[in-house]
Amino acid sequence: MTTAELHRMTGAYALHALSDEERDAFERHLADCEPCAQEAAELCATAARLGLAVSVTPRREMREQVLRRITTVRQDSPGEPAPMRSGRARLRARLLSRWTLAACLAAAAALGGTTVWQHQRAEDALGRARRAEQGTAQISAVLAAPDARTRVAKLADGATGTVVVSHERDQAVFLAAGMAHPPTGKVYQLWFDDGGTMRSAGLMDPGLSDQAVLLQGAVDGASGMGVTVEPAGGSKQPTASPLALVNFPA
């Protein structure tokens, strides 16, 4: 097993997707590779904290299926040169590229305004994806923070809520599992509890029973958080009794 192959195993190691032989080799590699050791530790912490949101027992055969399929997929090493093509193969590739470009231009001319509309839709979708990615990165950073502290609370109808607080990052994340959908026209709203004064911390997605939400705003000395049911769009102050009040972990 080469050093380059070992460098690419941090993610699989964090998710326990290595064979016993691969895991032993990778752990020996960690002793001499500080970047891999740090990356593996961060990925393990993030995976463990994300697991707090929901626990699902995988099928017994899933690990064997994944490991078996991995052997059929080749991963190129960084900087590995592309395979050489014959002159005839290069000619076919150039002709195919020109034909594809011509087809795209013809389609654009024929569709006109429809193409512009589709482009705008694609741009909007890309923007949403980027915002979602940024939100996920922020949530992961809180969950993996060295000073992150966790508290679990039972909610109505068997649902559970977990709050993870990082005072170093001055941020908190709420992980919900099994929450019932709010009534039509309503939404779950999160609040910081500033010594009895509730400060809005954002809205939850009404269509999801399991979700991770970054509380909007700084923790800033708040003693805990609450969840209420509010009209769609949220409220400036709670209009109903809290479904849950959770003290932040010390």
Image: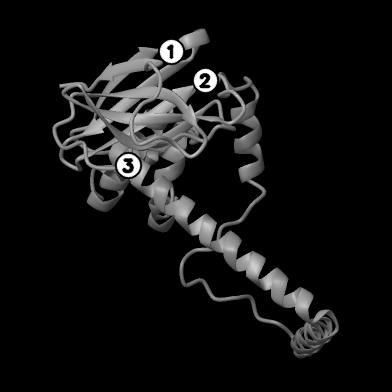
Check the image and report above or below for 121 versus 115: above
Q: Position of residue 181 (x, y in %)?
A: 58, 24
Q: Which mark is residue 102?
A: none
Instruction: For label 2, count other residues whose C-alpha is less than 10 Å away and answer few (under 14), some (14-19) or many (20+).
Output: some
**Residue 15 occupies quadrant:** top left
* Structural distance between the alpha carbons of marks 3 and 2: 20 Å
Circles 3 and 2, Cβ within 8 Å, touching? The answer is: no
Instruction: For label 1, count other residues whose C-alpha is less than 10 Å away and answer few (under 14), some (14-19) or many (20+).
Output: some
Q: Secondary structure at mark 2?
A: loop
Name the kind of residue labelled 3 in the image.
Gln
Is residue 55 visible from the viewing direction of this image?
Answer: yes
Of the numbered discs 3 and 1, the one sitting upstream in the chain is 1
> Left or right: where does residue 105 sit relative to residue 182?
right
Residue at the spot of label 2 = 179
Q: Which mark is residue 216?
A: 3
Circles 1 and 2, Cβ within 8 Å, touching? The answer is: yes
* Structural distance between the alpha carbons of marks 1 and 2: 8 Å
Q: Position of residue 194 (x, y in %)?
A: 18, 28
Instruction: Please name whichever residue, 167 or 14, is drawn nearer the observer in this view of the structure.
Output: 167
Residue lying at 38% horizontally and 55% vertically, measured from the top left: 3
Residue at the spot of label 1 = 155
Check the image and report above or below for 196 versus 10: above
Quadrant in which the C terminus appears: top left
Name the kind of residue labelled 2 in the image.
Met
Q: Position of residue 128 (x, y in %)?
A: 53, 56
* Structural distance between the alpha carbons of marks 3 and 1: 21 Å
Is residue 53 visible from the viewing direction of this image?
Answer: no
Residue lying at 48% horizontally and 50% vertically, measured from the top left: 132
Q: Secondary structure at mark 3?
A: loop
